[in-house]
Amino acid sequence: MPTSTIVVFTIRDSTKALLLQLLYCSWWIVLMMALRGLWITLSLTTLSYLTHLTHLSAASPHTCAGVRKEYTLRHMGEGREVPDTPQTGLDLQVCVTQNLTCCTRKMEERYQFTVRRDIQNLLQTSSSALKLLITQSVAGLQEAMEALVRQAQDQTVALLLSTYRDLSEDAAPTVDELFTDVGLFVLGAELSLEEAVQRFFLALFPPVFERLVEPGLERLDGGYGECVRSAGHGLAPYGNAPARLTKQLSGAALPHRVLLQALHLGVEVINTTDHLQLSRECRRALLRMSYCPHCQALTSTRPCVGYCLNVLRGCLASLAEVDPHWREFVGSLEALLVRMDSGMDLERTLAAVPTIVRDAIAHAHKSAPYLSSQVRGVCGHPSRLQSGGVQRGVRDSLPLRVPAKLSEETLSIRRKEFLTSLRVYRAFYGGLANQLCVSELAAQDGVVCWNGADIVKSYTQQVVGSGIKAQADNPEVRVKEADPVVNKVIDKLKHINQLLQGRSIPKLGTLDQIETGSGDAEGLYSGDCDDEDGCWGSGSGPGGKSPAVRTTNLIPEKNTNHRNHQPRHNDFGQTGSSSSSGSSSSSSFRTTKSVLLILIPVFTLSLLLL
């Protein structure tokens, strides 16, 4: 064999041996990498499993003891109603889950009653300061007004006593009746001030005629006195004093009357909204938000802010419709109180009544000859005393005593204090859902929270606005229409706003139509209610106590980011979390892909060499 041939075969054998060694090394490398990828995959899976077990251990997945503790502490029912260990919840209607659950159908009904009780307590607590402000202001204003009326009454009697001593005794009951009518009118009685003033001056004319026009007469008998009274009706013995008194009393008393009526209506609005009847959709949404986490042993988990806002803005959509009318109500009260302080005040008007009455009597006294002839022409000649006519009880007019300022200042100060406090609540109904979520119900920013189905870092659904129309896009609650009871309250607010602004003059009986009655809105419930959702007709539910509720103040809405959302593991480990399984699958896929990328060129090279 030629030397060249031997050399070629030798080189070929050497190359083949080298390639076989390279192939062996490649297979070894591939095997090592595959084992390494498998080890990494197993390590990640083991770590994920251990983490999952640790979390489930912390959440007590194998026991419902924590759920039972919360269930009994909140007086929802008896502890034996809670299962010892998680079980399938095939009969659940709201807190439906594919995992094991600590809830039963009976517990779900109890939760539904409790969440309605919770939200009503929250509504009442949030409005308690406003309600207390209005009720105390009504009582204080009424007390100050009554004191002013009594003070003006006493001053009128004192003035008559100092000027016309004999007349004062006969006129005192008539004066008392006038100021009683004024006080009743301010407090809301349906009577006419014009008629009250006319009755006062007509009843005053017989003693004025007897003591001042015909001072020497014996006391008039009943028949002649009634004739004098009737004759005085067409004689206008007091000049323009009756018309002036009517105008001043009506101008000052009517605004205070409307003010008190408006404040009573404000209490009615609060009572109605405090006892808002929740729709079936709303009750289910509240249950899902507040107590469905308990079924997964997440008793301390709070809802996400955006999720809470969607649920409460849906449930309180009717109350949000009150907002523009309530704002107008507060603004109208503010304008009325300013007008009172600038000249429409009851204080100065009542203080001027004694002077007007004195001027009226003085006018009759100056017109004595004319009045005497007119009355004699109608009623005949009265008998005289034998001692002759001697004027009795007449003195020169004394200066009017300066009235005490205590009641006047008290009424003015109370009005100003009330106005200052009321301004804080102008946007009360517009920000109610935000107030309850941010201050009471929702989780803090940056804390994992409940989104209605799982624990997440943030809520990703669209957060809708307030009001009925905005709920068309609400992903959590379906809102059909406004509450009819709330609509009725809105109509009353519209009417009282017109009165407060002076755009409508109240007629007799109209103010009664907007009064509160008992002020209790318990009988004004609206909305649908059925046994399926645990809406018990008796109104009493399990347990006798309500959970503690924190007192809150109005808090402006925060700008929160609800876009980033990371789900976590299910609680009882029946099905893996979508994010965990997705991460494990992705890691395995990347390892397999790397192995294939190495194996394909190695197999190709082997085939070429062979």
Image (cartoon, grey):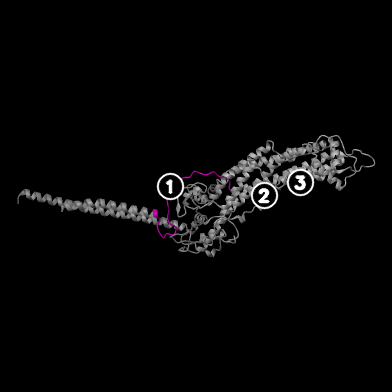
Residue 512, disc: 2
Disc 3 from disc 1: Cα separation = 68 Å
Residue at x-position 76% and y-position 46%: 180
Other-residue count near label 3 (Cα within 10 Å), few / some / many at <14 / 14–19 / ≥20: some
Segment colored magenta: 551-579
Closer to the chain start, of discs 3 and 1, is 3
Q: Judge from the rendering whether residue 347 lies leftward or rightward of residue 300; answer left or right.
A: right
Residue 313 belongs to the span the image colors magenta:
no
Residue 180, disc: 3
Could you tell me the amino acid type at mark 1? Asn
- How many numbered discs? 3
Quadrant in the picture for residue 329: top right
| 479 vs 198, nearest the viewer | 198
Could you tell me the amino acid type at mark 3? Thr
Residue 116, disc: none
Residue at x-position 42% and y-position 50%: 566
Q: Judge from the rendering whether residue 52 lies leftward or rightward of residue 381; answer left or right.
A: left
